[in-house]
Image (cartoon, rainbow, N blue to C red):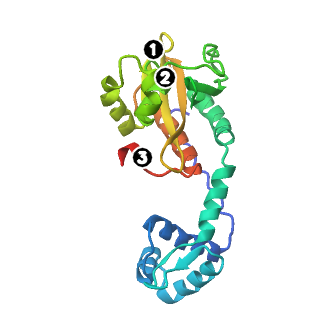
Amino acid sequence: MDGAEDPKITVPRRKGIQSILTGFQVLDFLLKAGQAVPLRDIAAGTGLSASKLQFYLISLAEVGAVKQDVQTGHYGLGAYTLRLGIAGLQQFDIYQSAHARMEQLAKDTGATVFLGVWGDQGPTVIHRTESPSRHPIFDLRLGAVLPITGSALGRLFLAYLPKSVTADHVIGGIASFEDSSRHIRQARLSISRGELLAEHTAISAPIFDQSGRILAGITLMGPQNLLSDDPDSAAARALKTLTETISHEAGATTQHYLDF
């Protein structure tokens, strides 16, 4: 009914082992600290008493997840967390992470959604999904290489890749695109209207890897009268949420390395 609010659906929380959750709370604090810290800082940051925290740190140290500096007594992440992180990155599959979510985004927005990476020839489409309610955009075939300055995906890579990688693909030099590239990095969105396809809008957002480098981009594309190019539109926000979620699964840092 018009004006009616969607009913709240409460999903019961599955019962777990609280001590494991607390242990990961300690590890998360050490991860965010970025360096070895004293016991009192961990206690303050986690809300655990120093006496209770000692038991967790002893157990975590026994499995190599935490190590204690013999000189300062401070605690930091251990070797096991490094092996765990490397194994997780090796098992990450961007297609597996993205394809079901792209299908849902296409359904929700009514737009074509495609995944692109930087290939030998430039921005390359490697996966595409169509909205079931719209005619497919056949121009965006798999393997298509898009213009770097004339497409939302292309300018996304131009904004985030080092100049040494993109310079040979830009006619007339990169300098004229520095302002737009900076704006793209600030907004985490690249928008194109009527460039790649007449009367179509495209919105691209980046996926980052664990080092803060761009791994891929996901693009929404649809007719201008159906897909808004407003960066605050529902479609643009949904796209950013999607790419941020995948970036998180890829172990991405919170800031791109070009902005350090």
Q: Which residue has dot 3 on it?
A: 257
- Graded by Cα atoms within 10 Å as few (under 14), some (14 to 19) or many (20 or more), the crowding at tag 2 reads many
Work out how far the residue at label 3 is from the one at label 2, CA to CA, in angstroms. Answer: 25 Å
| Label 3 residue SS | helix
Work out how far the residue at label 1 is from the one at label 2, CA to CA, in angstroms. Answer: 9 Å
Residue type (three-letter) at the residue carrying disc 1: Glu
| Label 1 residue SS | loop
**Residue drawn at (41%, 78%) of the image:** 41
Q: Is residue 258 above or below residue 125?
A: below
Identify which residue, 65 or 23, lies in the foreground.
65
Residue type (three-letter) at the residue carrying disc 3: Tyr
Q: Is residue 46 above or below residue 197?
A: below
Q: Which residue has dot 2 on it?
A: 202
**Residue 133: % across, % down:** 64, 20
**Residue 176: % across, % down:** 31, 23
The reply to whether residue 228 is in sight is no
Residue type (three-letter) at the residue carrying disc 2: Ala
Label 1 with label 2: CB-CB less than 8 Å: yes
Mark 3 or mark 2, whichever is nearer to me: 3
Q: Would residue 160 appear left or right of 143 to someone viewing this image?
A: left
- Going from N to C along the chain, the mark reached first, 1 or 2, is 1
| Label 2 residue SS | strand
Q: Would residue 204 appear left or right of 181 to someone viewing this image?
A: right
Mark 1 or mark 2, whichever is nearer to me: 1
Label 3 with label 2: CB-CB less than 8 Å: no
Can you name the residue that lies furthest to the top here?
Answer: 198
**Residue drawn at (43%, 68%) of the image:** 33
Disc marking residue 7? none
**Residue 245: % across, % down:** 55, 46
Identify which residue, 107 or 194, lies in the foreground.
194
Q: Which residue has dot 1 on it?
A: 195
- The image quarter containing residue 158 is top left
